Image: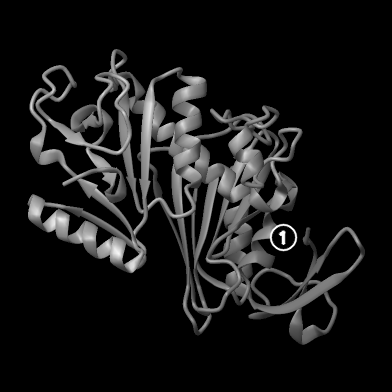
Amino acid sequence: MWKLKQIFDGEYGCEERQPGEKEKCLVILANEEGEEKTFEANEDWIAAIEKLSANPLMKIIISKPMAKDCQYKKIVVEKKGDGYQAAKYTEKQVFHDNFGVEDLQGYLMEAIHDTFLQVNAWDEKREYSLLISKKGAVTLRAKASKEAPDTVTEHNRKKNYILDEGQVIPPLVDMGIFTAEGKVVRSMYDKYRQINRFVELIDDEIDALPTDQTIRIVDFGCGKSYLTFILYYYLVELKKRDVKITGLDLKADVIYACGPTPMLRALKAYSQEKGILCYLSLEEKMACGIGACLACTCQTKDVDEHSQVHNKRICKDGPVFLAEDIEL
């Protein structure tokens, strides 16, 4: 973590800078290992950051990188307890720094210098905007803030996930996201958060799903089925629902089709001839939709548990079937 050590006037060598004396200054930062980093900075730039960091800021967003290949695309700094936490965003990852209030000025100088052109910040009453042109011109504005940003009282808040760490969740272990002891594998943390966000979306709607019948889900474009298996685990193991999931993926070696029976019959024959996996949807025959009228049966290779004959109910057992399992 880089901290501000000293600011010198550049033209006077190593004499301490006096306000308003010169335009070019030398900034010296130091870290805990005793290393130092120095750079020249416009006096207006230094004064703007000094003024900005002197306020009791609750949230800061550093954005608009100067170069397209900049390592971090934006940095979000938030007040947490007695200090700050910075989230540094790359294209695919987020890295965090924790530091004290007294180190805010040095952190901003190191983060912004020759890297970012815009800073927006908020305290409880005002919103601040710091703009830096590519030629070095600096503009700092402040205005009354209609809404103060949310504050977090804990320095490191732990999010309560539905699929929480510490549980042994078999599909997460099989995917390599959890260890056998239920700990998140460090390199898979982003995937873990993505899966939990997906489960949260489903959890918001779970009460709208029927409880007196099988929930049938068709997952189109399931890929490696990470989310498909997690959804099954959530609904069956955690919510104790009766669920049937069909996972489909858009690959060149798989056929998915619905439509007139002659067309489906021709596709079945073609898939068998070419050795291509084929799924057919037969929803055009469904009547009652709950499996009571038996009007939507189709002939199959397997014996139906309900009727003990070679057919299945499209509304209850389908409507999507493997082409090789049905007769057309």
Residue lying at the far top of the rendered structure = 212
Relative to the observer, which residue lies in front, 300 or 208?
Answer: 300
The three-letter amino acid code for the residue at tag 1 is Gly
Image-based side of 322 in relation to 182, left or right: left
What residue is shown with label 1? 106
Residue 208 visible in the displayed image: yes
Q: Is residue 54 visible?
A: no
The quarter of the picture where residue 38 lies is bottom right
The picture places residue 126, in percent across and down from the top left corner, at: 45, 45
Q: Determine whether 328 is above or below 169 in the image.
A: below
Q: Secondary structure at mark 1?
A: helix
Q: Is residue 296 left or right of residue 300?
A: left
Image quadrant containing the N terminus: bottom right
Vertical side of 250 occupied by 16: above or below: below
- Residue farthest right in this picture: 34
Q: Nearer the viewer, residue 43 or 147?
A: 147
Location of residue 313 in the rendering, given as x and y in whole percent from the top left corner: 21, 29
Question: In percent of the image, x 38 and y 26: which residue is there?
Answer: 243
Q: Position of residue 248 (x, y in %)?
A: 35, 50
What is the tally of numbered marks visible in this picture? Answer: 1
Q: Could you tell me residue 88's position as x and y percent?
A: 60, 58
Side of 67 where 25 appears, left or right: right
Q: Residue at x 61, y 65 (%)?
A: 47
